[in-house]
Amino acid sequence: MEIDFFKTLETNKDKVELLLLDYPRLRDSDSKLIANFWYYEIGESFNNMTAPEFLKMFADGKLTNTETIRRVRQKLQEEFPFLRGENYKERQKAGKDTQQKIINL
């Protein structure tokens, strides 16, 4: 994906959706999703940025809030099941198994 194209998208929803479509590995990890979101959000200067510069951007609120990205991802995966990760089915099954164990106590 081109950094310039990412920056043309107007909403965080569009940006997260594009990342989930282009990179399925991001569907199961909010940390990986957020890191990629910020990489494209920062753009070309990312590769020349020092850690203190990145931390200053983060501390100054110049990067999209992590909770915003997570909530958008959660809503998209709720609305569009094909954007769910591989771990989703496993978590659902584990939840049902736990529910059955509690009922059978």
Image: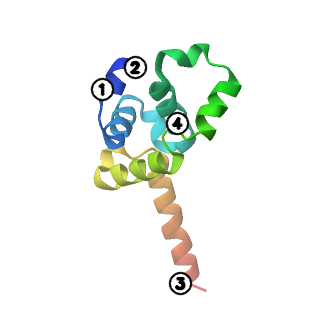
Disc 2 versus disc 4: distance between alpha carbons?
A: 17 Å
Pointer 3 local density, CA inside 10 Å: few below 14, some 14–19, many at least 20 = few
Q: Residue 22: x, y in percent?
A: 37, 28
Circle 3: residue type:
Ile
- Which element is circle 2 on? helix
Q: Which residue is mark 2?
A: 3
Say which quarter of the image contains residue 15: top left
Q: Residue at x 51, y 57 (%)?
A: 91
Give the mark nearest the N terminus, 1 or 3.
1
Check residue 17 in the rendering and tell me which mark sits there, or answer none. Answer: none
- Which element is circle 1 on? helix
Q: Nearer the viewer, mark 1 or mark 3?
A: 1
Seen as rendered, the residue at the extreme front is 60
Disc 2 versus disc 3: distance between alpha carbons?
A: 51 Å
Check residue 103 in the rendering and tell me which mark sits there, or answer none. Answer: 3
Pointer 2 local density, CA inside 10 Å: few below 14, some 14–19, many at least 20 = few
Circle 1: residue type:
Thr
Disc 4 versus disc 3: distance between alpha carbons?
A: 48 Å
Pointer 1 local density, CA inside 10 Å: few below 14, some 14–19, many at least 20 = few
Mark 1 vs 3: CB contact within 8 A = no
Q: Which residue is mark 1?
A: 8
- Which element is circle 4 on? loop
Give the mark nearest the N terminus, 1 or 4.
1
Q: Which residue is mark 4?
A: 62
